[in-house]
Amino acid sequence: MTNTNITYTQQGDYLLPDFRLPEQPQVEIGIWGKRHLRYIEKYHPIRYTSLLTSCKLTAYLADIDEQAQLMYERLVDETAKREGITEQLKADNMMVWVKRMNNVQARARETVNNELIYI
């Protein structure tokens, strides 16, 4: 017979096994990864549970976060250049520059959310 070394905790009338997931590396998950986490918890619970129990959730979220941040930065830079939003505009008319950059950033956020986060 095999010795499994499983410990149990008494919960009322039941003995429940003390299962613990292996230690995960401490990785900082940014805003994009946190948004995706909330989305899969709510709308894709099977995917969430599968990633969690296979100890792949942290790496998955870190990857999504990195991809989303790179996509966001690329979209903002490319769109700002294409629309002529320059440092010269910033120096000449700060309020117009802020208005146009806010618009570019909002569109980039929407694109990232639609293509990476809420899928």
Image (cartoon, rainbow, N blue to C red):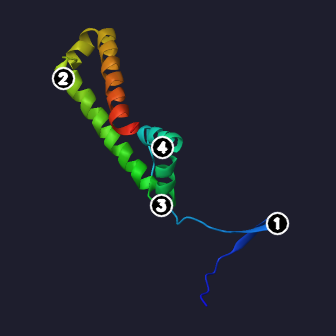
Q: CA distance from mark 3 to mark 2?
A: 41 Å
Q: Earlier in the sequence, mark 1 or mark 2?
A: 1
Determine the residue positioned at 68% across, 75% down: 7
Q: What's the distance in space between the residues labelled 4 and 2, CA to CA?
A: 34 Å
Q: Which residue is mark 4?
A: 40
Q: Pick the quarter of the image with the N terminus.
A: bottom right
The amino acid pointed to by label 4 is: Ile
Task: Check disc 2 and report its element: helix, strand or loop.
Answer: helix
Question: In the image, is residue 88 above or below residue 105?
Answer: above
The residue sitting at the bottom extreme is: 1
Q: Which residue is mark 2?
A: 81
For mark 4, does the 10 Å Cα neighbourhood hold few (<14), some (14 to 19), or many (20 or more) residues? Answer: some
In-front residue for pair 53/45: 45
**N-term mark: 3 or 1:** 1
Q: Secondary structure at mark 4?
A: helix
Between 108 and 51, the residue placed more toward the observer is: 51
Distance between the alpha carbons at the discs numbered 1 and 2: 67 Å
Q: Residue at x 41, y 55 (%)?
A: 59
Give the crowd class for mark 2: few <14, some 14-19, many >=20 residues within 10 Å: few
Residue bearing mark 3: 55
Left or right? Give the position of 16 relative to 92.
right
Q: Are marks 4 and 3 in contact (CB under 8 Å)?
A: no
User: Residue at image x 51%, y 60%?
Assistant: 53
Q: CA distance from mark 4 to mark 3?
A: 16 Å
